[in-house]
Image: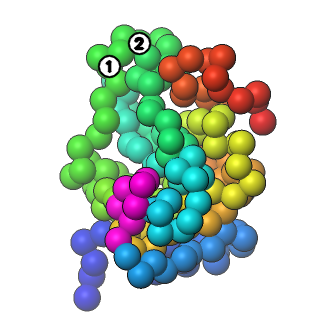
């Protein structure tokens, strides 16, 4: 049977083939939101990373942010040199089409399409972070350093107040 989208099995194969130390953690409960994932894992909300697909002037960009922070569209607009209205969060159908995973379980890598990645510097404050593992009952555990290495992400300050952002990794 052909799946309409990727699954944790596809992500596990990517992790294995890439030789990553990252690991998938099956969960006994649904973890589609940061609070649900943090509660299920017994970690701070900041240790949960969000993989969000944005559209910037027609181009897809994956933004990985710390779970306890809102992605400031002004920071993204400043990074791209465009107005805030040019930064749009992709709809669920677009996320599925471009990345191959459903919203609520999007991992930070292993997608069907390669898209450029921006990584919030706030993620670097943790030794270990947890992200979507391919569905809403699987989590991914890895270090921020491995996350940056495998995605080739550019570090960016996504905090509304840059004074609150940690030093660059």
* Viewport quadrant of the C terminus: top right
Instruction: In the rendered view, tell whether residue 136 sits above or below residue 152.
Output: below
Instruction: In the rendered view, tell whether residue 16 sits above or below residue 64.
Output: below
Q: Position of residue 45 (x, y in %)?
A: 52, 50
Image mark count: 2
User: Residue at the spot x=25%, y=72% of the render?
Assistant: 4
Along the viewing direction, whichever of 135 and 44 lies nearer the viewer? 44
Circle on res. 82 = 2
* Viewport quadrant of the N terminus: bottom left
Circle on res. 161 = none
Along the viewing direction, whichever of 138 and 19 lies nearer the viewer? 138
Tags 2 and 1 touching, CB below 8 Å? yes
Colour logic = rainbow
Magenta residue check for 118:
no
Q: Position of residue 141 (x, y in %)?
A: 62, 66
> Visible in this render: residue 105?
no
Q: Is residue 48 left or right of residue 8?
A: right
Magenta residue check for 35:
yes
Q: Position of residue 88 (x, y in %)?
A: 30, 29
Q: Secondary structure at mark 2?
A: loop
Mark 1 — residue? Answer: 86
Q: Secondary structure at mark 1?
A: helix
User: Residue at the spot x=51%, y=20% of the render?
Assistant: 160
User: Residue at the spot x=50%, y=59% of the render?
Assistant: 38
> Visible in this render: residue 20?
yes
Along the viewing direction, whichever of 126 and 73 lies nearer the viewer? 126
Q: Looking at the image, which residue sits at the far bottom? A: 1
Q: Position of residue 79 (x, y in %)?
A: 53, 19
Instruction: In the rendered view, tell whether residue 144 sits above or below residue 60.
Output: below
The span picked out in magenta is 30-36
Dot 1: few (<14), some (14–19), or many (≥20) neighbours within 10 Å? some
């Amino acid at each position: 049977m052909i799946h309409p989208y990727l699954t944790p099995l596809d992500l596990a194969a990517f992790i294995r083939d890439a030789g990553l130390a990252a690991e998938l953690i099956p969960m006994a409960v649904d973890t589609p939101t940061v609070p649900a994932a943090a509660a299920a894992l017994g970690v701070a909300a900041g240790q949960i990373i969000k993989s969000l697909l944005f559209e910037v002037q027609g181009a897809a960009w994956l933004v990985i942010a710390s779970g306890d922070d809102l992605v400031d569209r002004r920071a993204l607009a400043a990074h791209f040199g465009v107005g805030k209205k040019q930064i749009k969060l992709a709809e669920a159908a677009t996320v599925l089409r471009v990345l191959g995973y459903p919203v609520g379980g999007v991992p930070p890598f292993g997608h069907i399409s390669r898209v450029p990645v921006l990584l919030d510097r706030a993620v670097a404050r943790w030794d270990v972070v947890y992200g979507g593992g391919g569905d809403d009952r699987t989590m991914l555990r890895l270090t921020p350093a491995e996350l940056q290495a495998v995605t080739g992400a550019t570090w960016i300050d996504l905090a509304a107040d840059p004074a609150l952002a940690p030093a660059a990794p």
